[in-house]
Amino acid sequence: MTKEQKQVFVALSGGVDSSVAALLLKNQGHRVSGVFIKIWQPEFVECTWREDRIDAMRVAAALEIPFYEIDLSAEYKKHVIDSMLSDYRSGVTPNPDVLCNRFIKFGALWDFVKGHGADFLATGHHARVQKVEEQYKLLKGVDGSKDQSYFLWQLTQEDLSHTLMPIGEMQKSKVRSIAEQHDLPVANKPDSQGLCFVGHVDMHDFLRTLLKTKQGKVLDVSGAEIGIHDGAALYTHGQRHGFSVTTKQPHSSPYYVSEIDVEKNVITVTNELKKEVVTKTVTIHNCNWVSPISEEHLSCALRYHHEPQKCKIRDARDSVTVEFVEEQQPTPGQSLVVYKEDVCIGGGIIGRR
């Protein structure tokens, strides 16, 4: 970014990260506005958006910046919730936070603020955007324990060209300290956790209610019925809890989900984890490459906060085979995100074996 004053809209969530992002950008001399996103929430989940909206308004007032609100309930229901439920119904485990970033924050929200004259959209993500010559790079946040680049792999060069993530350059403790020093009203507000925007929910109960699941059979690899489960769509490949094995022997090994058949409402489990669940290769699809792929020194994360594993990529087109140096336990439907050191190269959705 040049030193020229820009019109920046900050996605104010009511949390400390986005609030400090707005503060920093205002102190840099930019014309800053705050915008709060209202999204769809089911009736059976405790509503938190009203409290978050009030907190976002209080921050905007403290910073003396304009405040906007946009209702993206329909877009969130369609692109995040409905898509997530469709994946669960097909027997795979999606990552709704990735969808939220792609379609809500960096999709519909950007369209809104662009229409209000924004040069940039800023967020409170713990990640970094750097321009190197004519290419933009997406990097991990400086605070490794809070890094959120994993959820941002679907961003494009166009997205990055108008995106700012100012707190990605600092530790979370520093963010808190800045908020306290400037008496921001959310300085000590706990971090939000759980489903994007919806907050902390018991995902098992959340899905069971929306999918209207019913109990079904648990089978072993021979096809014998050995227990019951709460609904096949609720389970993840490799999961070792949440179902009952009624014929389990006292000293037998733990059982892991190896197959999910939502149509028949049965799951198959195994206690041979290595044979049925672990692999050294996986295929990913719906790929997006933020930066050009190189063939050397790549690593990948198979889930959020997963320690990146050394890997090789055979072909960087829409469907890609990833080879791991060490055996891994991939989950179909989750995001596999590729890195070269701190640079997020891109990624794809893990396919079925």
Image (cartoon, rainbow, N blue to C red):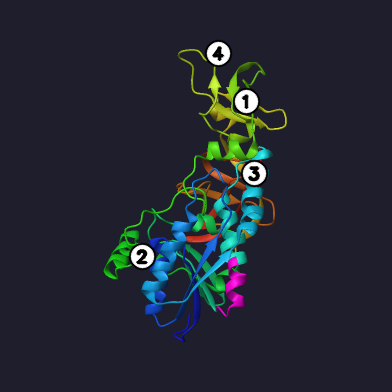
Identify the residue position indicated by label 4 in the image: 247
How far apart, in angstroms, are the residues tagged by discs 2 and 3?
36 Å
Q: Nearer the viewer, residue 306 or 341?
A: 306
| Residue under the point 62% across and 71% down | 111
Q: Earlier in the sequence, mark 1 or mark 4?
A: 1
How far apart, in angstroms, are the residues tagged by discs 1 and 4?
A: 17 Å
Give the residue number, with chain letter if any, for mark 3: 85
Q: Horizontally, is 204 left or right of 167 in the view?
A: right
SS label for mark 3:
helix
Horizontal and vertical percent position of residue 258: 60, 30
Mark 1 vs mark 3, CA separation in Å: 18 Å
The residue indicated by pointer 1 is: 215
Secondary structure beneath disc 4? loop
| Contact check, label 2 and label 4, Cβ < 8 Å | no
Is residue 271 within the magenta segment?
no
Residue 145 placement (x, y as % from top left)? 38, 53
Label located before the other in sequence (2 or 3) = 3
Q: Quickly name the residue at label 2.
A: 170
